Amino acid sequence: MRVKDLMATSVTCVRPETSIEQVAKQMKQENIGSIPVCNDRGEALGIITDRDIVIRSVSNENGPKTVKEIMTKTLISAEPNMDTHQAALLMAKYQVRRLPVLENNQIVGMLAMADIARKPIYVDEAGDALSAISKQSTLS
């Protein structure tokens, strides 16, 4: 199965100058844990997660105020025609639960671990990837 068969296609982006407060409200409203960060041309620049907000902003007094200051700039992504197994391996390797799906550096979808786990044939694979993701990270 391909990533394009499982990914969510209604994906919103935020701009780097978006306030952290606004992005948190958007996450709450849309019931999501991450939002890609894009420039005016819709090109992916990074991603901001609920964890970024808590660890890099809320926990710091007088901390950062905009997405640009706390977003993850190294974007781990999938391609629409990538095999779902490859995407799960990427999630496990980089300890992420969500992958932006890019085509020509444009966001065309998001693939979450939950999307993979919903398919009965991928339940074990999702569990293995989630186990790897949940290990303590050595990244800061």
Image (spheres, rainbow, N blue to C red):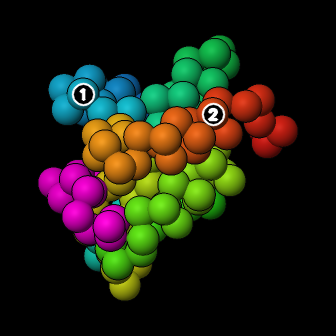
Q: Earlier in the sequence, mark 2 or mark 1?
A: 1
Q: Based on the picture, tell me whether residue 9 belongs to the magenta stretch.
A: yes
Q: Residue 71 at what x, y percent from top left?
A: 54, 46
User: Relative to 20, is 105 above or below?
Assistant: below
Q: CA distance from mark 2 to mark 1?
A: 23 Å
Q: Magenta segment, which residues?
A: 1-14
Badge 1 amino acid: Asn
| Side of 60 where 9 appears, left or right | left
- Which residue is painted at 18% across and 58% down in the image? 9
Which one is in front in this view, the residue at disc 2 or the one at disc 1? 2
Which of the two residues, 36 or 8, is positioned nearer the viewer here?
8
Q: Residue 101 at what x, y percent from top left?
A: 37, 65
Q: What is the secondary structure assignment of the residue under circle 2?
A: helix
Q: Residue 98 at what x, y percent from top left?
A: 44, 47
Which of the two residues, 37 or 16, is positioned nearer the viewer here?
37
- Which residue is painted at 66% across and 19% down in the image? 60
- Which residue is painted at 41% across and 40% down in the image? 123
Q: Quadrant of the N terminus?
A: bottom left
Q: Based on the picture, tell me whether residue 90 belongs to the magenta stretch.
A: no
Camera sees residue 64: no
| Side of 80 where 53 appears, left or right | right
Badge 2 amino acid: Ser
Q: Residue furthest bottom?
A: 104
Q: Looking at the rendered structure, which numbered label has been put on residue 131?
A: 2
Q: Which residue is mark 1?
A: 31
